[in-house]
Structure formats: C-alpha cells, structure tokens
Image (cartoon, rainbow, N blue to C red):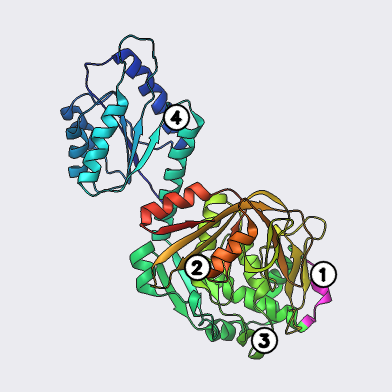
Amino acid sequence: MKLQTAYFPIGVPTFHLESAGEEFEKSVSLLKSIDSEVKVPSEMLLSIDKLKEFAAGVKPDLAIVQNITFANAAYMTELLRMFDCPVLLWTLREPVIDGGRLRLNSLTGAFSAGNALAGFGREFFYVFGSPEEDSVKEKISCVVKALKLKKAFEELNLLQIGHTPQGFGFGRGLDTELASVFGTNLISIEARELINKARSFGDDDIAEYIADAKGRITALDSIDKNNVFDFARLYKAYAEFVKDNNIGALSSRCWPDFFTDFGTPVCSVLAILNDLGVPSSCEADTYGALSMFAAQFLTDKPAFFGDPVSLDEGENTITFWHCGMAACSLAREDTGAEAGVHCNRKIGPTLEFGCKPSEKATIFRIGKDAEGKFRFFIAGGEVLDKPKQFFGTSAVVKTKANSADIINKAVLSGWEPHFAVAMGDIENELVSLAKLLNIEVEKY
C-alpha cells in the first residue's frame, strides 16, 4: 500500500521570512517523523508559480496545506483545481507577540483558505499550532493513519462465508455497498465449500495444524480427539482459502451448520485466524469483521468481538462476551487460551478465558441506522483485569462515559448487538476515517 502525502507551505514574501523559514524546517522534520515518504518542497512556496511548479510533480492522497505566512485564497483555489484529494489545513501559531511586527499572519491566511475550501464544497481537516506541539503531531498523525486505513479498505478482500442465521440479518454484507462506501471487495462462498474441503483431508495432512494449535491453546488434549482432528481440518481449509485468495478479513457462519452438519465448531479456527492477523467474526457478521479489521489496523493488535451481555453501574462497566472465538493472544496470562466446549451445544473445541487488561480500549461498530445509512459507534474506556465472566470469552470494559447511559442510548438508537473492542485508544483516528468516508459518528 502506497500513500502519498504532500506538504504545501504557502505564503508571500512580505512577512518575516526568517521566522517563516524556522517554522518551515521544523514542519518538514515533524512531517517526516510521521511519514518518512512525505513529499516536501525544497523551499517555501511564496508565489503561485512556485506552488504550481511543486504541485506538478506530486499526486497526493493527502494535501497538507500550511500557511507558512499569510496567503490569499488564490493559492488554495489553485490547489483545488489541480487535486481532488483530502486537505489538511494547518495554521501556525504566531512565534512572537511583543508589540512589534506581525511575523507570519498564518491565521488570516487560514480563513482565506477555509473560505475557498467551503466555496468548492470540500470537507477538510484543520489543525492550529506550532510544529513542536504534541496536539499538532497527534492530529496530523490521526489523519494520516485514517487515510492509510481508508486505502487498506480499498485493497481489502473481505470473505463472507455462508449466510447470517435467522434474525441476524444486520451483519449481512452487500457487495455493492462495501465497494461503493469503503472500496472493499466482497468475496462470498457457502459454508459447505469449506466443510467439504475440510472433510477431504486425512490425518497426516493436518499434523502441523494440530501442533500449531497446541502452541496457542491449552488443554486441547481434554477435548474429544475426533473433534480436535476435525477442528484441525477446518483450520487447514480456512487457512488455505485465506492464503490462496489474499483474504484480509472474514465473517463466518457458525451455528447451526458446524454443529449439525460437521459435528465440530469453527470457533477456535476463527480465534487462531484472529491471532494470525486475519480479523474474523462469527455469525457471518460481515460489518463486524470490517469493524475488527479497522480496529486491528489502527492498534496492531487483534480486536475482541462480542455481544454486550452485562452492565454493572457500580463499576461503570459493560461486559462483552462470545461463545469462544477471541484471539488466543488476548487471553489472561494466568490462564492462557484454554480449550472448552460450546456453552449450549457441549461440543468443542471453543476457547475459555477472560481478556487480559488494556489501559486503553475503544468500543467500535460499523453499523447502519434505520434508513440503511452507515454510521460509526465509538466509545472509549479500558479493559479491566477480570477473570472469565461466563463460559466462553469475555472482556470487561470500564467506559469513559456513564455505562448505563451508553447502554440506554445504544439500545434506543437501534445499534446492532455485535461490537469490536480495540485494545487501544483509536477514537480520533476513527472520527477522521468517518470524515474521509462521509459517515456519521455517534460517540458515547
């Protein structure tokens, strides 16, 4: 994935160029620390001719336009005529306020640029501050990360295995929606295709998959041997399809087929795929898988996928749970990812554990409102150091906002019952992504 960001320090030569030059050098250093491949000019762009000359040599996915000094609206207008890409407008703080000369007048230039952007009907990002300020680095980094995620969506092959169960239609992905809104390619197959593939493998074919699973899952030997072997057959079938088709994330049907037709659940297969960097949701929740993909991309860690099943107003917590398909690496160190049997079907292997703590966490869902328009659910918090709450896997999240209010508002707003819990604070990145995709955000 190649992403090109370009820096346009625009201005006029009638202000204090020594101050402007210092800000220019510091800005270049900051941007290169965020994106080493950023395209920067060799000098400040203090005329429209200089701007055109530099712009002719770049094809940016993101234009970072900084008023290095005041510049009138003609500069931004020229850029908007040349490029149809997101714009981050950056205003510099006045370096000196001593009753003397106005050194940069960057802020007035920002109003001119913002007015031009509005006139073109362009949404844009905005940041105010000097290159040394942490808030400036954080804002620019958020936008760059969000744009990288948007690019990753556009390069993503998302696999949908089987149909959602009766009453779970909220997770069913549509190829045209995924392509038009996210740029994502949806690949759909029936669960029986992978079940039949799994049945074709002999015991010798799956030895390495059993060995790998035993390195991730404790007490696997406590599960019926036939179920362990059938699980390994499924693991091989899924892993090979993912590799052969360049799959970056998937949603999989699970019940009832894998219990009734195959005799072994797919839960632990999905858990290992999550560990291997392929976000995988169950109950064929394709938008849940896309949510997990975003969470993993921004944190470099597997996301927990589950239902909100318990509320504790005293602790200000919400417990998220599912039958046992969370990434093995999320398990508490004192227990590890332990093999168990499904809480309802009594067939294994599924996983049994509580998630290890995370000081920062983000609850996230790509969902739809009653009119079918996409929206983002975002809520911040932390994963507490709690043992397994129920049979299966669980994560207890202490939310920043009042947990009871979150539950009340989310239910009344018609949110879907599946959420991703990201192991990190990615709220600002997700808000930036929503702006890039023109999707509504509901922050809780």
Lower position in the chain sequence, tag 4 or tag 1: 4
User: Can the viewer see residue 245?
Assistant: no
Q: Residue 226: x, y in percent?
A: 76, 84
Which badge, 2 or 4, comes first in the chain's sequence? 4
For label 4, count other residues whose C-alpha is less than 10 Å away and answer few (under 14), some (14-19) or many (20+).
Answer: some
Badge 3 amino acid? Phe
Q: Which residue is at 48% across, 72% downward?
A: 159
Give the mark nearer the N terminus: 3 vs 4.
4
For discs 2 and 4, the disc positioned in front in the rendered view: 2
Kindly report the distance in space between the C-alpha atoms of the residues bearing marks 2 and 4.
41 Å
Label 3 vs 2, first from the N-terminus: 3
Task: Give the image quarter of residue 235.
Answer: bottom right
Q: CA distance from mark 4 to mark 1?
A: 50 Å
Q: Which residue is mark 3?
A: 259
As helix, strand or loop, the secondary structure at mark 4 comes to: helix
Q: Which mark is residue 413?
A: 2
